[in-house]
Amino acid sequence: MSDNNPILSGSAQSIAAYQEAIAQSSQAVIDWLKQPEMYQGKTVDQLRDRIQLNFTDEGLGNQATIARAIEYFLKDSLSVHHAQCVAHLHCPSLVISQAAEVLINATNQSMDSWDQSPSATIIEIKLIEWLREQVGYGAGDAGVFTSGGTQSNLMGLMLARDAFFARQGHSVQQQGLTGDLSKIKVFCSENAHFSVQKNMALMGLGYRSVTLVKTDAFSRMDVADLRTKLAQAKANGEQVMAIVATAGTTDAGAIDPLVEITTLAAQENIWVHVDAAWGGALLLSEKYRHYLNGLESADSVTLDFHKQFFQTISCGAFLLKDARHYELMRYQAAYLNSDFDEEHGVPNLVSKSLQTTRRFDALKLWMGLEALGKKQYAEIIDNGVTLSQKVAEYVSTQPHLELVMQPQLASVLFRFRPESGDSAFVALLNQRIGDVLLASGSANVGVTEADGVTCLKMTLLNPTVCLEDVKILLASVKETAEKLLNA
């Protein structure tokens, strides 16, 4: 090995190299943050031609490699903190979250056993206890941090499946799936996250196991249709394994009627998993917490902190109401969670997770809560919801701008509506508006569909954005539309 040992360690040489690399990278980020453009505007083909790998026998060294990363990655990255970057549930991050990443990355703790992450394990457990309290669950620590909503939803569905079979005296863990699997169903709304279908396929039950329930004018699950479809399933000899309710659909931010759904499910002895990856942020809200009434009755819950909790990617959690259901996925490995450790009260979180090696992402949420305090956190979460309502009012006053749906969380669905043109023409026009704005580097507006209508979407998570910023964006939308119409 060369004299320049590249490993982070306590040696003077390593510490000096670390300081130099962090300083160079930090300065580059500071320069990038000052960049006025939202995006440098390179196309897929331009980026493919521009970015080249340079793996040499000798290596380039830290300084040159960081310089290349700045040139080919950082400068061409999307500025998610920019006021005109509103396309997705992609949040700007808290400064304290960036500081947490430094500590997480340098210590490189692995959360799969206590002896690899002693203090981190205890912090995560205490955070899970706190999150359960916010949801309204009883005392306990049944839950775990995850990579995000898809993984948390998988855990909820997997435990729902295993509990469903366990009630029939069958262990999926020990014996695998059995019986006529075509008769097993999961219900969710038409606007639920695609991970419901994806995860049911991963679990061997397939897309066909998912029954879609109609939604109302606000994209919320229609409970009357849910009742009808439950009755139809029973008449067909089908068995409902779970109902997945959504608290914050990706586009509309719709929150299903949780009280009615959980009440109906309790009557039918059906597991309810709530995907609150987005709407779960309202747990900290001072104005809108009541939107989540009924969440406390769900059997399991998904939360994401890399959305409106403003944490860096990735950071999510899965919460389980009844800890006994964790036994359905327990596996003992002497090298991680031995019987001896359990007998002596040593906590090993690997028993609660689908992952083995896992980052200490819980540190980001802990530091965020301690740094901001509950009141300031509530303010920045509520800001997005309140701002979306103001933006909707403004859109409704603008010629050629049409509000597609009243906002529910921090998103606004709208479209440019020219004086003439059929639905296909209007749909293509709005698609092109989004494409042109991104290509110009000036704005990133989402393009989606709501009840078959192609529309534009603003996801207003950024607490530094105000109504005047959005007015500038909407002016760009109208200007771009006019240029396209006159081309």
Image (cartoon, grey):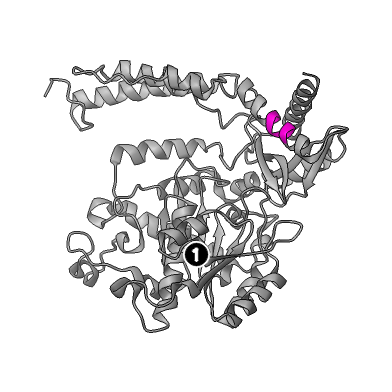
Q: Quadrant of the C terminus?
A: top right
Residue 14 is at least partly visible in this image: yes
Image spot of residue 210 (x, y percent): 54, 64
Instruction: Tell me if residue 432 is in the magenta stretch.
Output: yes
Instruction: Identify residue for label 1.
Output: 132
For residue 36, above or below residue 143? above
Determine whether, in the image, residue 393 is placed left or right of residue 133. right
Q: Residue at x 41, y 20 (%)?
A: 51
Q: Residue furthest left?
A: 1
Residue 63, picture quadrant: top left
Q: Is residue 338 magenta?
A: no
Q: Position of residue 223 (x, y in %)?
A: 69, 70
- Packing grade of label 1 (10 A; few <14, some 14-19, many >=20) is many
Circle 1: element type: helix
Pinpoint residue 188: horizontal percent, then vertical percent: 59, 64
- The residue lying toward the viewer, choosing from 345 and 333, is 333
Front-lying residue, 286 or 475: 475
The quadrant in which residue 459 appears is: top right
Question: Count of labels shown?
Answer: 1
Instruction: Tell me the kind of residue under disc 1.
Output: Arg
Q: Position of residue 434 (x, y in %)?
A: 67, 31
Query: 386 left or right of 127?
Result: right
Q: Residue at x 24, y 51 (%)?
A: 116
Residue at x-position 26% and y-position 21%: 55
* Residue at the image point whose x is 78% and y is 23% from the top: 479
Can residue 318 be seen in this snapshot? Answer: no
Rendered position, 204 above or below 54: below
Looking at the rendering, the stretch of residues picked out in magenta corresponds to: 428-433
The main secondary structure of the magenta stretch is: helix
Above or below, 56 against 143 in this view is: above
Image quarter of the N terminus:
top left
**Position of 117 compared to 153: left or right?**
left
